[in-house]
Amino acid sequence: MRGTWQGSGTWQSSGPDLRGLGAPVALVVVVYVVAEIVLQIIWYIAAFLGAVLVGVVVGAVLLRRSTRRHAAELEATRQARLAAAATRQIAQAAPAAIELHYHNHYHAAPDSPARIVIPGTAGDAITERNTQ
């Protein structure tokens, strides 16, 4: 880049004028910074989803193992459980020799206040008064 020294104390360049490149350079820098931030967020999201996926796989494996263990325990005790259920059914099938049955009725006296509290046809219907 060639230039000449002016008497006023400023440097005058004879090369290309670069004053118009400030806005495009700033735009490129802003786009680069925004893209960098977005890519970091995408990596964080990918890492989080990877951790979730690992957790789901580990949980599924542990659930499957416990289910198999539970099924094996049930199969090992199957005969004893069937025998106990058959014994219980036989015991429940025998009816009781005497069945106690309590049934209590409460009625108000004919002229008690409970009978005359509701006037009119509603009172007649509830208290079974015959008004014919």
Image (tube, rainbow, N blue to C red):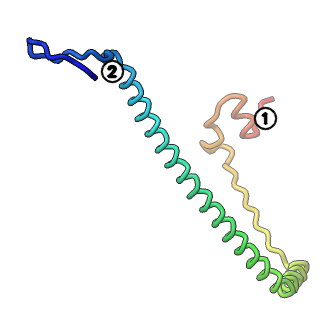
Name which quarter of the figure residue 90 lies in.
Answer: bottom right
Q: Which mark is residue 122?
A: none
Label 2: state its secondary structure. helix
Residue pictured at 83% horizontal, 75% vertical: 99
Alpha-carbon neighbours of circle 2 within 10 Å: few (<14), some, or many (≥20)? few
Q: In the shown orientation, is residue 54 left or right of residue 3?
A: right
In the displayed structure, would residue 46 be above or below residue 83?
Answer: above
Q: Residue at x 80, y 73 (%)?
A: 100
Residue 96 in view (yes/no): no
The image position of residue 84, as x and y in percent, is 84, 85
Q: Residue at x 33, y 16 (%)?
A: 16
Query: Quick one: 89 or 103, which is closer to the camera?
Result: 89
Q: Quadrant of the N terminus?
A: top left
Mark 1 element type: loop
Q: Is residue 124 left or right of residue 11?
A: right
Pointer 1 residue: 130
Which is nearer the N-term, disc 2 or disc 1? 2
- Rendering coords of residue 43 (x, y %): 51, 48
Q: Please name the amino acid that badge 2 sits on.
A: Gly
Of residues 123 and 58, which is closer to you in this image? Answer: 58
Residue 31 seen: yes
Disc 2: which residue: 22
- Closer-to-camera residue (93/53): 53
Q: Residue at x 61, y 61 (%)?
A: 54
Instruction: Describe residue 108's horizontal placement relative to residue 26 as left or right.
Output: right
Amino acid at dot 1: Asn
Disc 1 crowd rating (10 Å Cα; few below 14, some 14-19, many 20+) is few
Front-most of residues 32 and 76: 32
Up-down: is 13 above or below 82?
Answer: above
Residue 126, given in percent of the width and then of the height, sits at: 72, 39
